[in-house]
Image (tube, coloured by chain):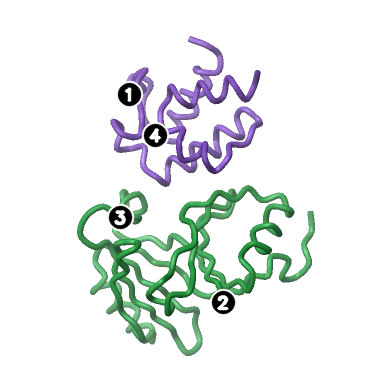
Chain colours: A green, B purple
Amino acid sequence: MQFSMQAFALRFHHFGLASRRPEQTLNFLRGLGHEVIRQVYDPLQNVNLWLCPHASMPTVELVAPAQGPGPLDAILTTSSESIYHLCYETENLKASLEALKEGGFRVICVSSPKPAILFGNRQVSFYMVKDFGIIELLESS
Amino acid sequence: MSDIENRTRDVMMKVLQISPQDISPDISRKNRPAWDSLKHMNLMLALEDEFGIEFSDKEIVELNSLHFLVDALRTKRS
């Protein structure tokens, strides 16, 4: 099956990088020229988050476990760090999900829409796309 | 042991990376830490491939033991 450009109406936003040792990871990102423009603890996900844009490279969201169980437990089992999701913005979540399914992609909801403190309480949700991996969908408003 | 259970166990071994003797009849996400949330999604996708079926979102959340999985697969294939 072939798709037109922007068939899913998704726009790349950032890479999600999980790390058990965020200070060292931040040092590396700063060395690459990334800035840290926001740092928050997200109680809904129980993770610490840093948003690290760059003048000419894609933005990285650094995600580190907080105290207790959290969503990174399954991600950081065999490695201390992992790029584990790609985030895309959507103007219309329902339409984007429908387009993915109509395109023949198997999409499983991992985490339903919740306000994301890192992004001014815009809604984010996570999905497993078979043969691609985990995507985060960030709603535009 | 039924064909469905044998095939389910084979898929579990591959996805959860555990040996046959680790798959007890009462294996579930509660008593098997290796069966984490990420592996659970991969397990459900692999079972969909194996049996040519599709689980609902509700089933993906609720089918968290070998017993439940085999029962659901029997129903879907009957």
Q: Which mark is residue A70?
A: 3
Q: Residue at x 52, y 11 (%)?
A: B2
Which of label 2 and label 4 is nearer to you? Answer: 2
Number of callouts: 4
Which of label 1 and label 2 is nearer to you? Answer: 2
- Subunit ID for the residue under disc 1: B
Q: Foreground: A15 or B61?
A: B61
* Quarter of the C terminus of chain B within the rendering: top right
Q: Residue at x 54, y 43 (%)?
A: B57
Residues under numbered marks 1 and 4 in contact, where contact means CB atoms less than 8 Å apart: no
- Whether residue A31 sits left or right of residue A9 in the image: it is left
Specify which label sits upstream in the sequence, 3 or 2.
3
Looking at numbered disc 4 in the image, what kind of residue is underneath it? Answer: Gln
Question: How far apart are the alpha carbons under marks 3 and 1?
Answer: 26 Å
Q: Which residue is mark 4?
A: B17
State whether discs 1 and 4 lie on one chain: yes
Q: Which mark is residue B22?
A: 1
State whether discs 1 and 2 lie on one chain: no
Q: Which residue is mark 2?
A: A140
Looking at numbered disc 1 in the image, what kind of residue is underneath it? Answer: Asp
Question: How far apart are the alpha carbons under marks 1 and 2?
Answer: 46 Å
Instruction: State the image coordinates of residue A22 (x, y, percent, origin top left).
Output: 26, 70
